[in-house]
Amino acid sequence: MNILGYFQKVGKALMVPVATLPAAAILMGIGYWIDPVAWGGNSALAAFLIKAGAAIIDNMSVLFAVGVAYGMSKDKDGAAALSGFVGFLVVTTLLSPGAVAQIQGIDPAAVPAAFGKINNQFVGILVGIVSAEIYNRFSTVELHKALAFFSGKRLVPILTSFAGILIAFVLMYIWPAIYGGLVHFGESIQGMGSVGAGIYAFFNRLLIPVGLHHALNSVFWFDVAGINDIPNFLGGAQSIANGTATVGVTGMYQAGFFPIMMFGLPGAALAIYHTAKVENKEKVASIMIAAGFASFFTGVTEPLEFSFMFLAPALYVVHAALTGISVFIAASMQWIAGFGFSAGLVDMVLSTRNPLAVNWYMLIIQGIVFFAIYYFVFRAVIVKFNLKTPGREDDDEEESSVRGSKETGELAKQYLKALGGHENLENIDACITRLRLTLKDTSVISEKQLKALGAMGVVKLGSNNVQVILGPLAEIVAGEMKKIPASEDLTAVALP
């Protein structure tokens, strides 16, 4: 499998854990709506909902380890997911500050701060990929009779735990450098004023897919490099009196996020909905409404961002650039507001009474402009480059009738024969609308026969990867193809 095909496989697997995020957004959004002042301090129900949603958001890293391992496994088996969980526990436990101090024989106070941030999405995704690869290769291994109980799928978690030790060993030496590089980068742009604020915001969004934005945030939002933007802003009049805050400056690393989270991303959600195929609009609408509401009301952007960042990474770079521009504009114009949780409506309202909030209402006007920018830019880019945002996986399909057998099992045999038989297939997978196949030789397939059977298109990716666009039947046909014994003779199967 070539690199492009492999990353597409990873991107598809990442949608498994991402599907859990709208639940968190809805729970937290309702909780903040019930108690917008104390965030659960004045309402047991609000606290219940907020904590329930936070249980998902705060554990995204382990969800990615489990979800990616499951999504990339060859037969979507729970043993792969269990292995991902085991691997994640091994890595994060070995790299916890206490364990690092013990393993390296150093004082706990001397442990690099990087290990306090080891529980992140980057580690989750890495462990998930490794776990899936181990499962795909060793889940059918048969051990000696004395060890037969540990054969097959039971062997995978054991091997994954050993792989986790190796991963932890490597990260123990390179993770501080990665983390330190991010902190140094933040410190180097601290003196660039509003331009630096924009650069920070750009990289803040770019690092979200791997969870490393927290390292960068700590430089600007907290007291790693003396900026301490959030605590100083929340201190209000007391911070001004203490000389730790300056009106029009403190909050500059927060303010420009409000137009993006409250307006820009909901505009992107509308564009994604409008560019989805007609038959997929209802499904896409349910996702975008929940994600857009979460972004606007609470500033929880992950459900929306993760819905397109891996399916259309170029579009995510556009989003990061627009975020940088927004933060730069707000900082330059000294339109200031701050937040305690995130840049949503709740924090906007709470921020209005803070004496450090300057012309905060202009952020709403800026946000309306960015809603339009996001909508039209996203819509234009999606259509122009045919990006595979939610609901567009079959965008280039044309309606066609299935002229093969009406029996799904027989139809699967026909597709298998047109693809060169089991001997030509290395891997069979499917998404909602496409067969995703890895072939030994793509030259032997018959596109004419595939289309005659009902395929709406055939997409070749590299030298070995092929996608056959079938529509809603794709997953069913893929399942039936896997059931066909490799020894079955297909010579008698008739093709159109």
Image (cartoon, rainbow, N blue to C red):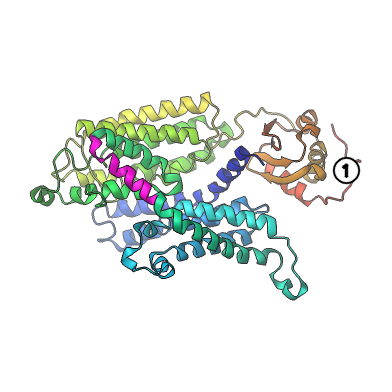
Q: State the extent of the magenta-drawn residues as a range.
A: 179-193
For the C terminus, the quadrant is top right
Disc 1 crowd, CA 10 A, few/some/many (<14, 14-19, 20+): some
**Is residue 486 shown in magenta?**
no
Residue extending furthest front?
Answer: 105
Q: Quadrant of residue 305?
A: top left
Task: Please state which amino acid type lies under the numbered disc 1.
Answer: Leu
Q: Residue at x 32, y 31 (%)?
A: 325
Residue extending furthest bottom?
Answer: 146
Residue extending furthest right?
Answer: 492
Q: Residue at x 62, y 59 (%)?
A: 80
- Could you say where residue 209 lies in the image, as x and y percent from the top left? 45, 45
Residue extending furthest left?
Answer: 241
Q: Is residue 65 above or below residue 364?
A: below
**Is residue 185 shown in magenta?**
yes
For the N terminus, the quadrant is top right
Element under label 1?
loop
- Could you say where residue 41 lies in the image, as x and y percent from the top left? 26, 61
Residue 38 in view here = yes
Residue 344 in view here = no
Residue 180 as seen in the image, left or right of residue 359? right
Residue highlighted by disc 1: 490
Q: Nearer the viewer, residue 16 or 242?
A: 242
- Could you say where residue 189 lies in the image, as x and y percent from the top left? 28, 39
Q: Residue at x 15, y 43 (%)?
A: 356
Number of disc labels:
1
- Could you say where residue 224 lies in the image, as x and y percent from the top left? 26, 52
Residue 201 as seen in the image, left or right of residue 86? left
Prevalent SS, magenta region: helix
Q: Nearer the viewer, residue 31 or 71?
A: 71
Q: Nearer the viewer, residue 67 or 453?
A: 67
